[in-house]
Image: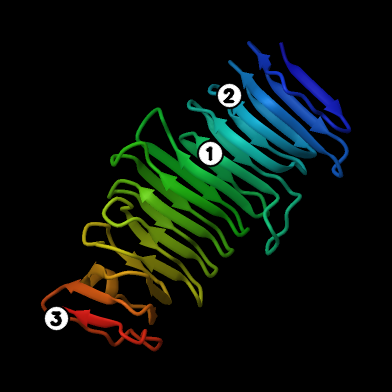
Amino acid sequence: GDIKITGGDIDGSGNITATLGDVQLNSTNDSETSTLSGTITADAGAITTLGGKYAISDLDANAGGIAIAGDSQGTFGALQTTGSSVRVTSTNSTQGTTGDVSITTIDSPTVLAQGAGDYSLGTVSSSTGNAVAITTGDGNDVMTLTGSDANEVYTVSTGNGDDQVTNTVAAATSSINLGAGDDTYTPTAANGKGSVDMGAGTGDVLALSGDYTNNGVILNYEVLQISANTTMTEGQLDNDASFQVQGANQIDVTATSLNLSSVTAGFGATTKFVV
């Protein structure tokens, strides 16, 4: 059956397991942190936090999914729901402040963080399949895409807000749309692949360091931040948006000719282009 726990402060170090039902947690005192250091498991059902402030180590609900709802906030360690989704709809946060929901790792094919708050999703991957879909709302959200292998396809859509996305491993067929706001996108050279649209904004930052010849097209950034000598394709550099270059390093471009009319200002002291 279901396990429902309600109290001002819910603390414990043991495991909580619902073999056939759901687990629901509802802390009614937001000034207290409910610390649960054991593993919370719903083998056939869902896990839901309805309200309160938490420090939870491990949530496993492969069949029914995990929901951080109501005015729930706090830190959440490892979230695993390999056959369902992680949903973050907490209304406690407000855009422009430090995120009230912070997660360390997510193992799930679907992540829906569509509340108005700022959410730190940690590292996101799926251990059961090669597709991950992540959708966030209008807050300032943070995530790291860490595919289990180079075939993992990510479909990412972030709403308004100043989002930060780090892409360490993703397939070339991945699609990443960062929406409105001044976002920061940091792909790992060679491995963090995909087609990227950084969306509407006045200060979108593309942070590079290495050889990005095979990383895919990246559009609509206003700042190209180079922290080491970097190789780019003409399509990555010669895009329609005006941008400035930051960093005193060399940029090698794989092209026979290059139009740098989009570069507005801000060359580093020793930045140079090699075509």
Question: Which of the labelled discs sits on residue 60, or is there none?
Answer: none
Residue 242, above or below 103: below
Residue shown at 61% from the left, 39% from the top: 87
**Image location of residue 113, percent across then percent down:** 59, 46
Q: Residue at label 3?
A: 257
Residue shown at 74% from the left, 38% from the top: 54
Amino acid tagged 3: Ser
**Image location of residue 91, percent across then percent down:** 74, 49
Q: Quarter of the image holding residue 127?
A: top left
Q: Secondary structure at mark 1?
A: strand
State yes or no: discs 2 and 1 in contact (Cβ < 8 Å): no
Q: Secondary structure at mark 2?
A: loop
The C terminus sits in image quarter: bottom left
Residue shown at 55% from the left, 58% from the top: 159
Query: In the figure, is residue 115 to the left or right of 178?
Result: right
Q: Which callout, 3 or 1, points at the residue further toward the start of the chain? A: 1
**Classed neighbour count for the residue bearing mark 3: other residues with Cα under 10 Å, few (<14), some (14–19), many (≥20):** few
**Image location of residue 3, percent across then percent down:** 75, 17
Q: Which callout, 3 or 2, points at the residue further toward the start of the chain? A: 2
Gap between marks 3 and 2 measured at Cα: 54 Å
Q: Which callout, 2 or 1, points at the residue further toward the start of the chain? A: 2
Of residues 153 and 101, the one drawn nearer to the viewer in this rendering: 101
Of residues 160 and 145, the one drawn nearer to the viewer in this rendering: 145
Gap between marks 3 and 1 measured at Cα: 43 Å
**Image location of residue 236, percent across then percent down:** 28, 69
Q: Residue at label 2?
A: 61
**Classed neighbour count for the residue bearing mark 2: other residues with Cα under 10 Å, few (<14), some (14–19), many (≥20):** many
Amino acid tagged 1: Thr
Q: Residue at label 1?
A: 105
